[in-house]
Image: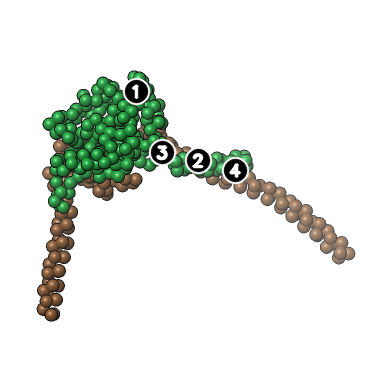
Amino acid sequence: MSRRLNVAAAVLCALLCAVLASPLGATEDLVQFESTEQQQLYRQLTAELRCPKCQNQNIADSNAVVAVDMRNKTLELVRQGQTHDQVIDFMKQRYGDFVHYQPPFQLSTIWLWLLPILAVLSLAFTVFRRSKSSQASEAPATETTGLDAELQAMIDAASAKSKE
Amino acid sequence: MRKTVFYVPLAAFLLLSLFLLSGLFSDPRDHGSALLEKPLPAFSLPDLQQPNRQISAADFRGEVTLLNVWGVWCPTCNAELAFLTTLRQQGVRIVGLYYVQPVDAAFGEKFDLPTLQQQVRDKLAEQGDPYLFNVVDEQRSLIFDLGVTGAPETFVIDREGVIRHHHVGDINPQNWPQLQRIYQQLQQGADHVPTP
């Protein structure tokens, strides 16, 4: 009985190994490059290009059909010796500016650069104004020294009177 | 001075609120098409049911056409087939661009045209057939050149073969009136179409 169990366990173990091993081997997509420059370019491009189907993933990170197709196309273009800008332009012609994480500098996107500068400038201006106005509000405090002296004089006068 | 110090942050806050509020009603999938007002990319792909017949961009000249990207694997596409069929009966020219899902060699899948033809025939017999013909894009080359991100998507192509409108998602009785306006204006030879 225990022998039968052993055989069953061995068969199960072998099956499990076979099932586990096959897809693991299959999912390792090794991409071959002619040079390290091409490899670096491919890595940079797949990190910079945005998957148009996903909400916020680059194409290296996504397994959506369109992201896989874009990775393959990027690889093909890099292997053809195309430059970074050429590949980006190729993708933008098809999928629009959305596809690149670096937005283009144009009239409709100028606020992306202007707004932070304006925010910092207006904050600096506010801080400057406030520090100035607080300095200005310190000025009346010097007047109270005059009042203090007056009060002191009154106290002195009163105490002199009480001594008499 | 004191008043402006109060109103400037309030105005900034209100503007930000309006901006974020408008974001609630925008469709994140809709980021326009880079191909609007451009001619259909050059291609030569077989007819799905008659693979000997090659279809090219020239087949889209002369008539306003809806190019509908779909696949039997896509539930939303299947849901719109019946409505598209009623549009065909009203005389709308609809051509299908069949989106072939990638095959996974690791699981023994391979592209098999006769099986696909049968699947498409069965599906269209069941749901209705809106298509004049279907273009089959096995390598997804035209699909890539059109900037298609998924299915269903529909391109409105004018008589000159120029892409004039791009619609992401299904076509249904609710959104058809907008598309119909564009379709009819293009039929009358309009140079400018309303942007919905």
Relative to A160, residue B174 above or below: above
Q: Is residue A36 left or right of residue B188?
A: left
What kind of residue is marked 2?
Leu
Q: Residue at x 12, y 44 (%)?
A: A34
For marks 4 and 1, the one nearer the N-term is 4
Q: Is the C-beta separation of discs 4 and 1 under 8 Å?
A: no
Q: Is residue B108 left or right of residue B37?
A: left
Residue under numbered circle 2: B18
The subunit letter for the residue under badge 3 reads: A
Q: For marks 3 and 2, give the CA distance.
A: 17 Å
**Residue that extends furthest to the top in the rendered view of this protein:** B189
Which label lies toward us, 4 or 2? 2
The subunit letter for the residue under badge 4 reads: B
What kind of residue is marked 3?
Leu
The subunit letter for the residue under badge 2 reads: B
Q: Residues within 10 Å of mark 3 (few under 14, many from 20)?
A: few
Chain A drawing hue: brown
Residue under numbered circle 3: A112
- Which one is in front, B99 or B15? B99
What kind of residue is marked 1?
Leu
The spot of residue B166 in percent (x, y) is 33, 32
Which label lies toward us, 3 or 2? 2
Which label lies toward us, 1 or 3? 1
Residues at marks 1 and 2 on the same chain: yes
Q: Is the C-beta separation of discs 4 and 2 under 8 Å?
A: no
The spot of residue A107 in percent (x, y) is 40, 31
